[in-house]
Amino acid sequence: MKDVVIIGAGKIGGAIALLLADSGSYRVTVADRRAEQLAELAPHPSVSALLLDIADEAALQAALEGRFAVLSAAPFHGTGRIAKAARAAGVHYLDLTEDVATTRQVEALAEGADTAFIPQCGLAPGFISIVAHDLTERFDTFDSVRMRVGALPQYPSNALNYNLTWSTDGLINEYIEPCEAVVEGRLVSVPALEEREEFSLDGVAYEAFNTSGGLGTLARTLEGRVRTLNYRTIRYPGHQAIVKALLNDLDLRNRRDVLKDLLEHALPATMQDVVVIFVTVCGWREGRYLQETHASKVYAGIVAGRRMSAIQITTAAGIATVLDLLAEGRIRTSGFVRQEEIALAEFLANRFGRVYDADADRLRRAS
């Protein structure tokens, strides 16, 4: 069994801990500065709790010494400290961040490291980049890559058509910070909440618009090889217009604490959610202009004996799969590792990654 530390005992951190511990391959220590959060962890003989403030650099590094890896499920603004402590302690580092600046900091820390630094191991960025890169490899040359992901309530019941399903800080950051895209072959910055589009999948209408961080490192990987590359978040129609009014007309983009308080006290959380994944790549193969598409949905369900939301399942499975592949030596074990370096087939074949397998899900539903 490998010893790992998870920083952050929230809904996602707790789901990761249970998934890893239930596999029988990992002993997990979950660290958080809030005792009440640690008290809510699902009991498991391979999970222990540690009261820890990551602002205490010495205590953080001491908690990581001798471990196999540290997994950050902390808010994006704390992950840089965790990565720095991982480098000092000589342990592998994985995170779920969507923040572009944080990822660049992690990349700098990874230079010359004997251990792996693997940011963006969740859903988007994360699995979405693995899927998109796999689709591009089916073409001789490719023209456009369009990535769309949304974590949505199955039963929307308010004007925003939305329930809180994950980190409020991360959600706000996605809606405010600039977004990367490739336009006419050039890597550019585009504003969040713009370039709205509509589409339908399985008879359900959706809208999608720019949000920050979802591309991960894929934009730099494919720059110069693709004409159009973009990432947009999926919501039900009407969501974007209200969020823009909150951020722009009420100026809440400059009062994030007020916006966070408003969202957390006005929007209920839900365990009845669905994750929608929609990736389309167009390009040329054997002289023909063709399209390849990956479309799937993941629903809330029972995992490791506990009911989890779809966003918990997909995010926890994403980072657990990458950790497993790292432990098995199936991905690079030193330096900066990009999500798109991971083979989709190996990801889906992994015991944790199988929750993403759309073909397996269809077979289960048909049986």
Image (cartoon, rainbow, N blue to C red):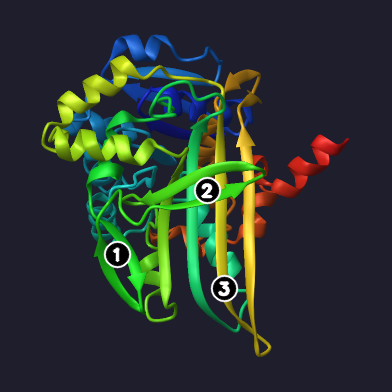
What numbered label is drawn on residue 351? none
75 or 192, which is in the foreground? 192
Residue positioned 28% across, 43% down in the render = 175
Kind of residue indicated by mark 1:
Gly
What's the CA distance linking mark 1 and mark 2?
21 Å
Return the disc, 1 or 3, that comes first in the chain's sequence: 1
Residue positioned 25% across, 58% down in the render = 104
What numbered label is drawn on residue 112? 1
Q: Mark 2–mark 3 contact, CB under 8 Å?
A: no
Kind of residue indicated by mark 2:
Val
Q: Provide the secondary structure element on which disc 1 rests.
A: loop
Q: Mark 1–mark 3 contact, CB under 8 Å?
A: no
Instruction: Give the foreground label among 1 and 2.
Output: 2
Q: Quadrant of residue 308?
A: top right
Residue positioned 63% across, 71% down in the render = 291
Residue positioned 42% across, 78% down in the render = 227
Residue 149's place in the image compared with 316, above or below, is below
Residue 80 placement (x, y as % from top left): 23, 44
Q: Which residue is mark 3?
A: 282
- Residue that sits furthest to the right in the current view: 367
* Quarter of the figure with the N terminus: top right
* Quarter of the figure with the C terminus: top right
Residue 328 placement (x, y as % from top left): 59, 51
Residue 259's place in the image compared with 81, above or below, is above
95 or 48, which is in the foreground? 95
Q: Provide the secondary structure element on which disc 2 rests.
A: helix
Instruction: Give the foreground label among 1 and 3.
Output: 3
What's the CA distance linking mark 1 and mark 3?
37 Å
Q: Which residue is mark 2?
A: 322
Residue 101 placement (x, y as % from top left): 22, 53
Q: Quadrant of residue 287?
A: bottom right
